[in-house]
Image (cartoon, rainbow, N blue to C red):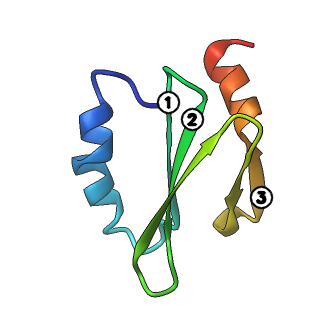
Amino acid sequence: MLSESTERHDRGKKFEQYRKLPSLREYLLVSQDQVLVEQYTREEDGRWSFREHRAGTQVHLPSLRCELSVDTVAARVFGG
């Protein structure tokens, strides 16, 4: 969950450190201000891809073999 006070760190140093973990396949950032999940995925060649997911969409998490509903995440974040 991104907060105003930690967003820069979560996008910068923290993600930089996490990318060094060979086992990390996906990194999600959840907005607390809007219905938005940002997904970073490590591709087979080691590059990281980026996708934005908004209301009504699913986040596919290949490493966990599951999908996450953005609406469900938003309900938990916003108390709906």
Residue 23 as seen in the image, left or right of residue 6: right
Q: Position of residue 54 (x, y in %)?
A: 64, 38
Q: Residue at x 24, y 48 (%)?
A: 12
Q: Residue at x 45, y 87 (%)?
A: 45
- Please tell me whether mark 3 sits on a helix, a strand or a loop: strand
Question: Residue 36 got which mark?
Answer: 2
Amino acid type of disc 1? Answer: Ser
Relative to 4, residue 60 above or below: below
| N-terminal label among 3 and 2 | 2
Other-residue count near label 1 (Cα within 10 Å), few / some / many at <14 / 14–19 / ≥20: some
Q: How far is mark 3 from mark 2, CA to CA?
A: 18 Å
Amino acid type of disc 3? Answer: Cys
Quadrant in which the C terminus appears: top right
Which mark is nearer the camera, 1 or 3?
Answer: 1
Residue 22 as seen in the image, left or right of residue 20: right
- Name the image quarter holding residue 34: top right
Amino acid type of disc 2? Answer: Leu
Q: How far is mark 1 from mark 3, CA to CA?
A: 21 Å
Other-residue count near label 2 (Cα within 10 Å), few / some / many at <14 / 14–19 / ≥20: some
Q: How far is mark 1 from mark 2, CA to CA?
A: 6 Å
Question: Residue 66 got which mark?
Answer: 3
Q: Are marks 1 and 2 in contact (CB under 8 Å)?
A: yes
Q: Which residue is mark 1?
A: 31
Relative to 20, residue 14 above or below: above
